[in-house]
Image (tube, grey):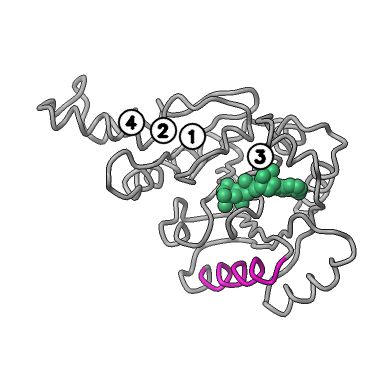
Amino acid sequence: MAFIIAYAGKGGTGKTSIAGLTIRYLIEKKKRVVLAVDADSNSCLNEALGVKVHTTIGRLREESLQSVRGGKERIGGMSVEQLLEYQVQQSIIESKGFDLIVMGRPEGPGCYCAANNILRKHIETLSESYPYIVIDNEAGMEHLSRRITQIVNLLIIMSDPSARGIQTAKRINELVDELQLKIDRRVLLINRVSDDIKEQLKTIAENSGLSVAGFVPYDSMVLEYDLYGKPIIQLPADSVAVKEVFDILDKFKIP
Ligand SMILES: Nc1ncnc2c1ncn2[C@@H]1O[C@H](COP(=O)(O)OP(=O)(O)OP(=O)(O)O)[C@@H](O)[C@H]1O
Ligand SMILES: [Mg+2]
């Protein structure tokens, strides 16, 4: 079974960037294939990873619904179940060291629960084929109740160095308890932190019942790569963000 790492947190706290660097970490340190899951309907994990998205689960679903509406009950002799299985396989984007699967946004007025449901149904099968799965979630907490996976081995809750960020992290942490999600370990990672406020942030976080896994410093290269559309996964190995994220991940002793 795969070791599953998921990201959550307030908007703009760095979930996608740090998920991208986590994928790089697993590829470099564990030397095994990673399944990257972009579960944000406003997806851009592919940009962090430097790959193009040719299709999403949401889009494939729309297409097959249209075929069904068009009178083709079965497509190529497949049942709906088989079709979905096939679609999940079809939506996997292969790249060097990792595969990417994108949930995508709804094409019509509907919600993206449907794509989410498809993904949830198949993630178990997928987790038998990949040693690592990294899930980049959308901002906020709604995704927790729509949970894609039953089990998450490591939930990394991201925050910026603000009281509001930590407050959101606290609420996420509480919701995990309320929903009784099966999460082996959850930690807080505070991003864009300058040295002088680490201690204060740590105290605020601990008073909110959160365990701080580490601080990622502000790294102008992260922003620069983002601005110029360069994949963050290609940051130089000595960039401060890469070094710090790698050090933090080392401490988790991921199997
Ligand atoms: N350590 C850092 N130093 C400097 N800039 C950073 C750092 N981490 C992230 N950023 C920048 O902050 C912005 C938000 O990052 P990112 O998109 O990863 O956040 P997010 O939590 O995924 O956002 P969203 O909630 O919109 O999905 C981006 O422009 C990114 O380049
Ligand atoms: Mg994001």
Q: Which residue is mark 4?
A: 60
Task: Name the residue rendered at 76%, 61% in the picture.
Answer: 213
Q: Secondary structure at mark 3?
A: helix
Q: Marks 3 and 1, Cα distance to the nearest angstrom?
A: 14 Å
Q: Residues within 10 Å of mark 1 (few under 14, many from 20)?
A: many
Task: Name the residue rendered at 61%, 57% in the picture.
Answer: 155
In the rendered image, residue 6, in percent from the top left (x then y), is placed at 58, 51
Residue 72 sits above or below residue 161 on the image: above
Mark positioned earlier in the residue sequence (2 or 1) = 2
Q: Secondary structure at mark 1?
A: strand
Q: Amino acid at mark 4?
A: Leu
Mark positioned earlier in the residue sequence (4 or 3) = 3
Q: Residues within 10 Å of mark 2 (few under 14, many from 20)?
A: many
Q: Residues within 10 Å of mark 3 (few under 14, many from 20)?
A: many
Provide the residue span drawn in magenta. 162-175
Residue 147 sits above or below residue 197 on the image: above
Q: Which residue is mark 1?
A: 101
Q: Which residue is mark 3?
A: 20
Q: Quadrant of residue 172?
A: bottom right
Q: Which residue is mark 2?
A: 56
